Amino acid sequence: MLDAKGRCCGKKPIQYKSSWSTSDGPHKYCPRCDRAYDLKTGAQIDNWAWRQSYGKWVRKTNKQESA
């Protein structure tokens, strides 16, 4: 979830508003930690790097989480 200032891991995510810019449609994306967020609610959503498993967010890639 984004903080009160709209930041993910200390950085504001990039907004992809056009459905033509990504395959998943409009959303926010953090280039620092690869998380994706719903454009309206700010809640984290599944993407190529993260998925929800048993109520927790799990990284799908081998990249180490630094945040």
Image (tube, rainbow, N blue to C red):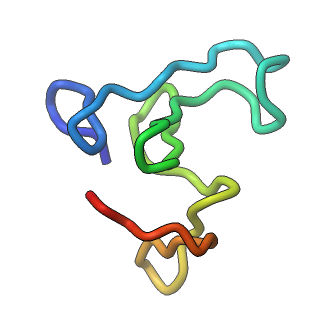
Question: What residue is drawn where x is 30% and y is 40%?
Answer: 8
| Position of residue 37 measured from the top left corner of the image (x, y, whole percent) | 49, 40
Residue lying at the far top of the rendered structure: 18
Question: What residue is drawn where x is 52% and y is 67%?
Answer: 63
Which image quarter: residue 42? top left
| Position of residue 26 measured from the top left corner of the image (x, y, whole percent) | 66, 25
Residue lying at the far bottom of the rendered structure: 54
Question: Which corner quadrant holds the C terminus?
Answer: bottom left
Judge by depth and name the residue closer to the eye, 63 or 46: 63
| Position of residue 27 measured from the top left corner of the image (x, y, whole percent) | 59, 30
For residue 7, above or below residue 44: above
Judge by depth and name the residue closer to the eye, 55 or 51: 51
| Position of residue 56 measured from the top left corner of the image (x, y, whole percent) | 41, 77
Say whether residue 64 is left or right of residue 11: right
Say whether residue 35 is left or right of residue 20: left
Question: What residue is drawn where x is 55% and y is 51%?
Answer: 45
